[in-house]
Image (cartoon, rainbow, N blue to C red):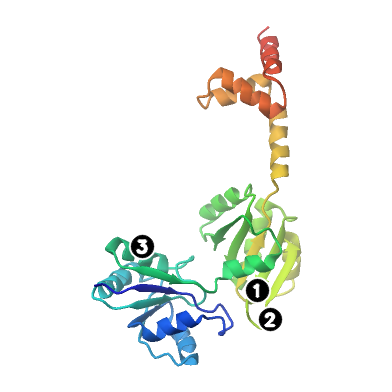
Amino acid sequence: MSGTLYICATPIGNLEDITLRVLNTLKTVDLIAAEDTRHSIRLLNHYGIHTPMTSYHEYNKVEKARTLVAQLLEGRNIALITDAGTPAISDPGEELVRQCHAAGVPVTSLPGPSACVTALTLSGLPTRRFCFEAFLPADKKDRRWILDELKNETRTIILYEAPHHLTATLADLKEVLGGGRPMTLCRELTKKYEEAWQTTIDGALDRFASEEPRGECVIILEGRSIGSRKEEQARAWDEMTVGEHVALYEARGIPRKEAMRQAAKDRGLSRRDIYQQLMEKDD
């Protein structure tokens, strides 16, 4: 019988933020796959855990995952940990989990700390609906494509950023989302100097124009209001003639009758009004 892969969440700052279940698992598995063994040894030493470790990170994730899966199939139990937080969330552990499922290896997740959820609960922004983008792409084209997608996002948006890239990222966000967009900047989560600062993109830029950002950052952005989107759409309809509006739906393969009904709904008119205006145009 194969062993089991245990996805173990570890502290994002305060070493006390670890569950008893994770501690017991780290002590009893045959091997711990850690993103950075030099970093993780501090956690293991703190709790007197002497289980062997092996490195599993972004640059060896595919080949090393095959090696780990082979060991799991031989019956060894392996715990997967990342430098901080929950493995496989914006993390190379995603690949190992995928390969385990493909090979029929049992996988279980031991819940615990996660920076994105911790920051969201501190933010004071809506939490019912949110989207997580982690780190924006470094490539300028890919980065702009993602930002353009986020421009009309109505859910609360969660981003990660390193302190030395924070100002540049805030400038990019201002260009696409506008400087007045409300946000909460979370830094040093669960540590002594933890901060959850409510501001705007402009406010954050002003602060870090004269202050060097410190600590890993989570940016929580308020989603675009649905009302503003509706107003913008209504203005777009007003700039079209009724004929152009109906033709827009017909171009999508919608029958003329239904296209007229939809255009009437968009404009707050009756279908008879739409028909009348189309007839006047034809005259």
List x then y, in percent, for residue 120: 64, 65
Q: Is residue 51 visible?
A: yes
Instruction: Report the front residue among 217 and 207.
Output: 217
Q: Which mark is residue 98?
A: 3
- Kindly check if marks 1 and 2 are in contact, taking CB atoms under 8 A apart as contact: yes
Which image quadrant is residue 269 in?
A: top right
The one nearer the camera, 214 or 230, is: 230
Q: Which mark is residue 187?
A: 1
* Label 3 neighbour load within 10 Å: few <14, some 14-19, many 20+: some
Q: Secondary structure at mark 1?
A: strand
User: Against 273, is 180 above or below?
Assistant: below
222 is higher (above) or lower (below) than 166: above
**Marked residue nearer the N-terminal end (3 or 2):** 3
Q: Are marks 1 and 3 in contact (CB under 8 Å)?
A: no
Quadrant where the C terminus sits is top right
Q: Which residue is mark 2?
A: 193
**Residue at mark 3 to residue at mark 2: CA–CA distance:** 37 Å
Density class for disc 1 (Cα within 10 Å; few <14, some 14-19, many ≥20) is many
